[in-house]
Amino acid sequence: DQQVKQNSPSLSVQEGRISILNCDYTNSMFDYFLWYKKYPAEGPTFLISISSIKDKNEDGRFTVFLNKSAKHLSLHIVPSQPGDSAVYFCAASAGGGANNLFFGTGTRLTVIP
Amino acid sequence: DVKVTQSSRYLVKRTGEKVFLECVQDMDHENMFWYRQDPGLGLRLIYFSYDVKMKEKGDIPEGYSVSREKKERFSLILESASTNQTSMYLCASSWAVPGEQYFGPGTRLTVT
């Protein structure tokens, strides 16, 4: 059963506008959340993370919001750029020594110039 | 800079062959992971290891085994490759605290 869900397989946004990628989770033990970006034929690269003690984390154009009561997080990219076109994976961890990550199915973002 | 390397970018094998996928990391990470990525299914964990000679099953270990004889190296073994193991295989490593995992470039395996 998928514990981390990304219900939108794809998203298209005009360059300069905001991209909002969504992620829902079911396991209330998750306490650390990450977003990864993946280009074709490359491994995922870390983008931004958030701990469950926060509700927002910002890094340049990227902001992650966490709503624990709704078990929902979102990634905002402002302004969107063509180079942001990639597949974005949401991931969650319940801690523990091996910090296993549970990944969503990914959302393909296309930023249209 | 963290570097995770995988032995092959592309591999074509026949059904029934034994397949070895090698992964090496250079950051002295305790944890190492093997995932497979399939369209519509995201990344699914096959096996992970939190120490040398230690291994734990992930979500989809059937048909796979692993070996970790040295801290920097984690091997994935397909004992008898089958067509349903055609996939992108990704190796990752991390420190032993909650945080990001660092991924290799992936191996695209095709089993015919």
Image (spheres, rainbow, N blue to C red):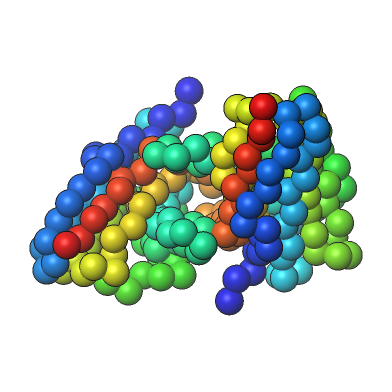
Residue at horizontal 11 percent and vertical 68 percent from the top: B16
Residue B22 x/y as whole percent: 25, 45
Q: Nearer the viewer, residue A23 or B66?
A: A23
Q: Nearer the viewer, residue A19 or B58?
A: A19
Residue B95 visible, this angle: no
Give residue A87's quadrant in the image.
top right
Residue at horizontal 69 percent and vertical 38 percent from the top: A48
Residue B52 x/y as whole percent: 34, 51
Give residue A79's quadrant in the image.
top right
Q: Nearer the viewer, residue B5 or B42?
A: B42
Residue A42 visible, this angle: yes
Q: Quadrant of the C terminus of chain B?
A: bottom left
Q: Is residue B35 left or right of residue B94?
A: left
Residue A23 x/y as whole percent: 72, 57
Residue at horizontal 64 percent and vertical 69 percent from the top: A3
Residue at horizontal 44 percent and vertical 66 percent from the top: B58
Give residue A73's quadrant in the image.
bottom right
Q: Is residue B58 left or right of residue A21?
A: left
Q: How many numbered marks are there? A: 0
Q: Is residue A77 left or right of residue B81?
A: right
Residue A62 x/y as whole percent: 75, 33
Q: Is residue A36 left or right of residue B60?
A: right
Taking A12 as reference, is B89 above or below it? below
